[in-house]
Amino acid sequence: MAQAEKGNSVTINFTGTLDDGTVFDSTLEDTECDDESCCDDGCDDGSCDDEGCGCGGHEGGPMTFTLGEEILFPQIDAAIVGMTPGEKKTVKIAAVDAFGEYDKEKVFTVPRSDLPEDLIPEVGDELSLSNEDDEELEVVVLETTADQITFDANHPLAGEDVTFEIELVSIQ
């Protein structure tokens, strides 16, 4: 039976979980995300390819990609190399190699006067802020007061070790 090699187009199913068992991403249509905070927008912006975040029941089921392009994480690509269709593997990825360690320096406070007047954020809102150079920064609102707003620019899964259950469905 054929084994997956770098450069092959492969189709996989996977489920990503946190250490507490929370499912944060899955291609299995009957698996629901327990915590969809990393992709409440439905993954339509393409960010899921870069960040590996998901929407529980990845739209369309199994995922097809070219092995070696690191569409998910390099550790997943490495695990798939040598697998045969139907084979399953478990890959654990430390926080530092997944979504990064939680960085307290990515939490910052901005005076309300520096933000648009029509912006009325609530705790938990996910926003995209931009600076004078039109660089965008994805943030979550942590706290609001009459005078200021505190934002967190860490990835929602920063600081979390993740585990992926992978099944190689086919090699094209």
Image (cartoon, rainbow, N blue to C red):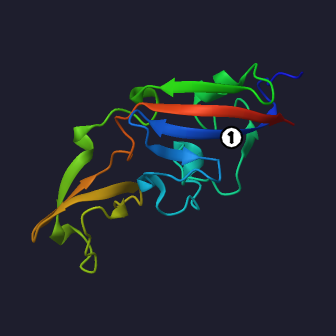
* Residue farthest to the right, as pictured: 1
Q: Quadrant of the C terminus?
A: top right
Give the percent coordinates (x, y) of residue 170: 82, 36
Q: Say if 14 sits above or below 57 in the image.
A: above
Q: Residues within 10 Å of mark 1 (few under 14, many from 20)?
A: many
Give the percent coordinates (x, y) of residue 20: 38, 36
Residue drawn at x 34%, y 60% is: 131
Residue drawn at x 28%, y 37% is: 103
Q: Quadrant of the N terminus?
A: top right
Q: Say if 158 sits above or below 89 in the image.
A: below
Compared across the picture, whether 149 is left or right of 86 comes to: left
Kindly identify which residue carries mark 1.
13
Judged from the image, the secondary structure of the residue bearing numbered disc 1 is: strand
Give the percent coordinates (x, y) of residue 69: 68, 34
Give the percent coordinates (x, y) of residue 38: 44, 52
* Residue farthest to the bottom, as pictured: 118
Q: Amino acid at mark 1?
A: Asn
